[in-house]
Structures are given as C-alpha cells and as structure tokens.
Image (cartoon, grey):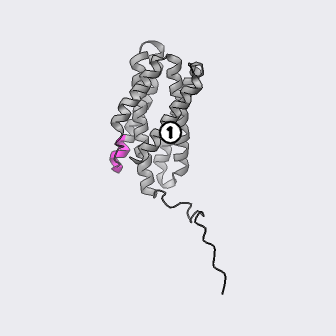
Amino acid sequence: MSPAKNSDATTTPVGGHMPGDPDKDELIERIIRVDQAGEYGAVRIYAGQLAVLGRGPKGDMIRHMKLQEDHHLDTFNTMAAERRVRPTILTPFWHVAGFALGAGTALLGEKAAMACTVAVEETIDVHYRAQIEKLGDDERELRETCRKFREDELEHRDIGYQHGAENAPAYPLLSRAIKFGTAMAIKLSEKI
C-alpha cells in the first residue's frame, strides 16, 4: 500500500484560482462595476476642483482632465449597459464624497488639489495595471480600454506633479490619506 498523498490546502489549484476567487464572468462584472464607479468619482472630484479653481489657466487644465474622465465614464456606462452589469449601490455616496474631496482639497490651494490628483491617479495606476494583467485575449477590448485609460490617468498624475503637488501643505499625510480612501473605495465598489 502506497503512502497517502499529502493534500496541502494552501496549494493553488490548477488554473491558478483559489477557492473564493471570482469566476471569469464575476471578474468582468467587478472590473466594469468598479471602473464605472471610479470614473464617476473622478468626474465628481474634478467637478469639485472646478467649483473652486474654475477660472483661469488652472481651470482650463482641470477641465481638460475632467473631459477625459467624462469620456472614461461614458465608456464604462456603455459597457455596463451592454453587459447588464449593475452599478455599485455606493454611487450616491461617491457623488457627494468625490465632489467634497475635489472642492475640499482645492480650498486648501492649487497645490493641494494637484496632490489629490496625484494620490488618486497613482492608486488608479496600480488598480488598472492589476486588471490588465488579469484580462485575457478573450477580453481584448476591455483590456485595451483599461490600458488606454491608465495612460490618461498617468498623464493626470504627471500634470499634478508638474503643478506643485509635492509642495502642498502636509503633502505626505494628505497623499497617504487620499490613497487609503481611494483604495477602500475600490474594494467596496467591486463588491457592493
């Protein structure tokens, strides 16, 4: 009689999926739901910044970024409708929280608004990169959309750095707080 094989519960099953991981359809729904929510939040952040800093050259720069975010949101709204993905139930909260974050940081000054942009976009960069890695060739269109939108977000991050984000009052603290809040918003919006 041969010895029993050791069944290690921590071994990753064939295909690299662990128990509790979403299946392909659930993964796609989560990606579309969270990206729609994220782009909605970004539109609201820029709307808040524009409410405070909307005049002059800074307003033009913020409007440029908001227009890109509007396009991102429209794209994910269309995908959600086509694939029948329900939006997060947190949308009303992101409506208020996004605007408050944008306006609140803008009230602290232009550099604080740019620090907000940098913190959000750096978190979104990591988020989009992880999604791109998970999407296969059968989801080439969604993967390409995430890749293109990630490039836009990196452009926004660079604009923030170019306009003094790191010189904002209490930059390290402000950046960490916004990154933490953004990461939490991502986790919540994926699931609910």
The one nearer the camera, 59 or 120, is 120
Residue plotted at (48% across, 20% down): 61
Give above or below for 108 relative to 149.
Answer: above
83 magenta-colored: yes
Residue named by callout 1: 183
69 magenta-colored: no
Q: Quick check: 135 left or right of 7?
A: left
Residue 7: give x, y in percent of width and height: 60, 71
Q: Quick check: 119 left or right of 32?
A: right
Q: Which residues are magenta?
A: 77-89
The quadrant of the picture occupied by the N terminus is bottom right
Give above or below for 109 relative to 132.
Answer: above
The one nearer the camera, 141 or 63, is 63
Residue plotted at (49% across, 21% down): 113
Give above or below for 13 relative to 36.
Answer: below
The one nearer the camera, 19 or 122, is 19
The image quarter in which residue 171 lies: top right
Residue 32: give x, y in percent of width and height: 41, 46
The image quarter in which residue 66 lies: top left
